[in-house]
Image (cartoon, rainbow, N blue to C red):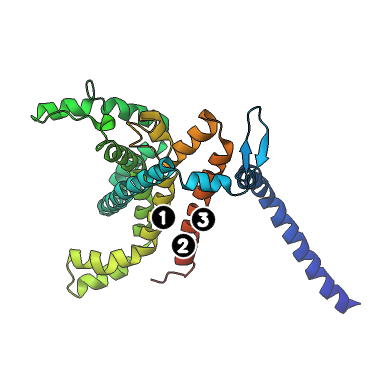
Amino acid sequence: MGRWARLVLPRTYMDRQRRAGFLFVLPAVAYFTAVYFVPLVESLVGSFYRTLPGGASRFVGLRLYELVFTDSAFWNSVWNTVKLLALSVPATVVLALAVALGLDRLTLRWRSLWAAMYFVPFAVSLVAAALIWQWIYDPVYGVLNHALSLVGLRPQQWLQSLDEVLPSLALVNVWARLGFDTMIFLAALQAIPREYDEAAEIDGATARQRLRHVTLPLLNPHILMVCILELIFNFKIFDQVYATTQGGPAGASQTIIPLLYDTAFKYFRLGEASVMAVFVFAVLLAVTLVQWRIFRKPVEY
């Protein structure tokens, strides 16, 4: 009897622990299911149905996928998204890393002050920030063109130019995301043991050599993580584009999420919008799987 009691009691205790753990995560699981999983399934199902006048729907199989993937406007929005990624992500990562390296050299008091200042843009509403930048970029009354006139340069069209609209939006993205990425890099720098840098200095390595051969290799996982986060953020960009240009001029800044929004809520083509949503999900899933494959290996200093 005593032996059976010893076998049953631990199992009962572990069962209670599992049930308690399940109850703790149940609210998060329910929220994720209601907010993410259910809309995902509905979008996947809806991508096979065409919405008819009057609100009815009809099953059309893969017809909507063929319609969307042969639409030049869709691929133009994808291409604009890729160009915006190419302009925003490298600049944000490099600048955030440079700022973090500079902050790491300051004393704790000044580091905290400057870190808070860099983080403020990330806490600002993207819509409010986009409206402010729209005023800054205004070709007639904008602050930026006024500053250019003071140094003898001609004013630019910025958001109203086919060639300048994407670089202008990329600058807004860099401004909005710089503080968040800086905090990640700064925390990673603070976690690196100082013994490595001191040992390299004793061996005669210069500051540039220590940065190249000691600091950056140890930051490599964090650099990759920030790059992937920025790819995801910029691929889903909506607020800045819709609040400033709404895809203009002439579709030069139309990215995939604003196009999805217009397709669903302006033209009420819910089937085509569902196809675009499935496309976005597939791309982001691929990026997430790459991230998991890269970061599943433990990092050893």
Front-lying residue, 240 or 24 = 240
* Camera-side residue of 124 and 207: 124
Residue on which disc 2 sits: 290
Is residue 208 left or right of 62 when viewed as pictured? left
Instruction: Give the camera-side residue of 58 and 286.
Output: 58
Q: CA distance from mark 3 to mark 1?
A: 12 Å
Spatial separation of the CA atoms under disc 3 and disc 2: 9 Å
| Residue drawn at (28%, 45%) of the image | 110
Q: Earlier in the sequence, mark 3 or mark 2?
A: 3
| Label 2 residue SS | helix
Query: For this view, does 84 lie left or right of residue 12?
Result: left
Indicate the quadrant containing the N terminus: top left, top right, bottom left or bottom right.
Answer: bottom right
Query: Looking at this rendering, what residue extends furthest in the top direction?
Result: 141
Using the image, determine if residue 243 lies above or below residue 294: above
- What crowding class fits label 3: few (fewer than 14 Cα within 10 Å), some (14-19), or many (20 or more)? few
Q: Please name the residue shown 32% across and 47% down the image.
A: 83
Q: For the residue marked with disc 1, what is the amino acid?
A: Ile
Label 3 or label 1, whichever lies nearer to me, is 3
Query: Could you tell me if the residues under marks 2 and 1 are in contact, i.e. CB atoms within 8 Å?
Result: yes
Q: Secondary structure at mark 3?
A: helix
Q: Is residue 292 above or below residue 38?
A: below
- Spatial CA span between label 2 and label 1: 9 Å
Q: Which mark is residue 228?
A: 1
Determine which residue is flagged by label 3: 285
